[in-house]
Image (spheres, grey):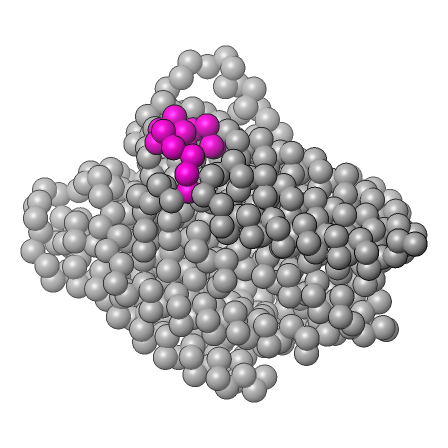
Amino acid sequence: MLTLTHFLILSCILFSIGVAGVMIRRNIIIVLMSLELIFNAANISLAAFAYYLESITGTVFVVFNITVAAAEVAVGLAILVAVYRRRKTVLVDQLDEMRY
Amino acid sequence: MEMNIGRLIPEFIMLGGAFVLLILEFFIPKGPRKWAGVFGICLSVVTAVVLSTQGYGSALSGLFIHDAISLYFKLLFLLVTALIFYMTILYEKNIENWRGEFYSLMLFCTVGFMFLASSSDFIGFYVSLELVAITLYILATFTREKSKSVEAGLKYIVTGALSSGFLLYGISFIYGTTGQTGFTEVAALVINNGGNGYLAIGLALTVLGLTFKVSGMPFHVWAPDIYEGSPTPITALLAAGSKAAGFVVIIRILLTALGSVRAEWLVLVSVISGASLIFGNLAAMPQKNIKRMIAYAGVGSAGYLFMAVAAASTLGTGALMYYLTTYVFAITGSFIALVIFYNSEGSYTIESLAGLARRSPLLAITIFIGFLSLAGVPPLGGFIAKFYIIAAAVQQGLWALAVIGVLMAVVAMYYFLIVIRSMYLRPAINTEKIRVDNYTRILLYGINAVTVLLGMYPGPLTDWVMAIADTLFV
């Protein structure tokens, strides 16, 4: 039997993996994928709450989130292309022109 | 459950203007677009006039609310937009490959700010926050042939999306506790049922996510790099607009929706406030680039504003609004002066400002007044604002925060005075005079006069903001 807690643990694991990915990985494409993971962790948690609370609002929220996340990633990839054209790198630690 | 679309007319006017500029872009050859800037300024004025005739009430089945606080903040945002459009007209020639989308994206961003000020539901709030965020990501990267600008944009989108993730995850827990997303419904349920573990997690994550918009600790790391790398008008928009927009939603979420569980967020907000104050002001001291210094000073300002939120009283909220108003005038005034300086000199370092007082007394006095107001020197507006915030903290017994606030005001004096010393006491490397055209001259005189007036005669504005703050705590 799946309970709310199972879903919340799943979303918590995904969220942690996402945050760790953003913090640790050097490749920006992996960082953007980790960000997607964070958004989907939040979506799982919202959908699970909506199901167990028997309320439709959470489900509607998930649909909005998916749209917004798609827009955000589109802009993110466009910026990544601009960065690659200008700097010829996709590694985070080589983008250190401005520090402290 | 009624739609009341009529209440959204001011937003629709701005949105319509943004689309008109976007469509016209197809038909007009590339090149300077000064008229688009003028159009944006006129549009802001028209919207402000229409806005002040709107009645209070809610629309879109409770997703949107127009009340005293949203009116105040929207007028502030329109003021910021008009001033920043003017700044962009001055800055235009520094952008190679000029594209008119710059102006329409700024209008979209203002629409996002206005919706944020009116949001009364977590869904509407999140979508308008992302409208602001995504347009700002594009604007920060706009000068994409500059290596610093693209780097700034990428850093901004990664940190921005990370903080949105925190915010969203936090909202999901608040929704999980209450089963509601409307601020007033959440407030009613929280008063009746009190908090629990989920609500505490949700609160902590939401507050952490919101610190990003206002560049408070711990999501402040983006601020210096993005301020330095973005086109200057966008730096000013981030400093003045984004901070004000962040705090209006913080007021709504923490004081309206979750005001009854203040005990649960008080410690977190106080720690954020103290840490931002100390870190921002100390890190600003060794900076060589003015935009970077303002970014760190902005982290310090977020500390003061969080102190006002922690006080959670009429005085505190009124002081927050007063602070943001003086902040907007100080930032836009000094940035317009900096843009004119950059146009002739091509540099933002503190050393390059040497001898500015002899090269252009007006620019020097504008930066002087703006920075002293940010530092909180009497008799300027910034002093009154800091004074009210610290008074509110003392009134609520937040002694530790009040002491940190006073000490850090002294530190802030130090680094702003370095700039002022450079302008007034150092000999100029290049003694050529900097020309300021007449419109800009009048505008700068006006902004300086307002900053001084807010400090010398704060009565009318204080009465107004305190009356608005009173409506939050009935």
Q: Residue furthest front?
A: A1
Report the side of B249 relative to B362 (left or right): right
Q: Quadrant of residue B128?
A: top right
On the image, the x and y values in percent for residue B142 come to: 42, 32
Q: Reply above or below: B451 against B96.
A: below
* Residue at x 71% of width, y 38% of height: A66
Report the side of B288 relative to B25 (left or right): left
Towards the viewer: B382 or B132: B132
Towards the viewer: B439 or B9: B9
Report the side of B275 relative to B181 (left or right): left
On the image, the x and y values in percent for residue B375 come to: 34, 68
Mark count = 0
Q: Reply above or below: B26 against B221.
A: above
Q: Main secondary structure of the magenta part?
A: helix
Q: Quadrant of residue B4?
A: top right
Is residue B71 at least partly visible in the picture?
no
Whether residue B229 is in magenta: the answer is no
* Residue at x 81% of width, y 56% of height: A6
Residue interval drawn in magenta: A79-92
* Residue at x 73% of width, y 52% of height: A11
Q: Quadrant of residue B451?
A: bottom left
Towards the viewer: B234 or B458: B234
* Residue at x 47% of width, y 39% of height: A27
On the image, the x and y values in percent for residue B211 come to: 54, 59
On the image, the x and y values in percent for residue B129 come to: 62, 47
Is residue B439 at least partly visible in the picture?
yes
**Quadrant of the image for the C terminus of chain B?**
bottom right
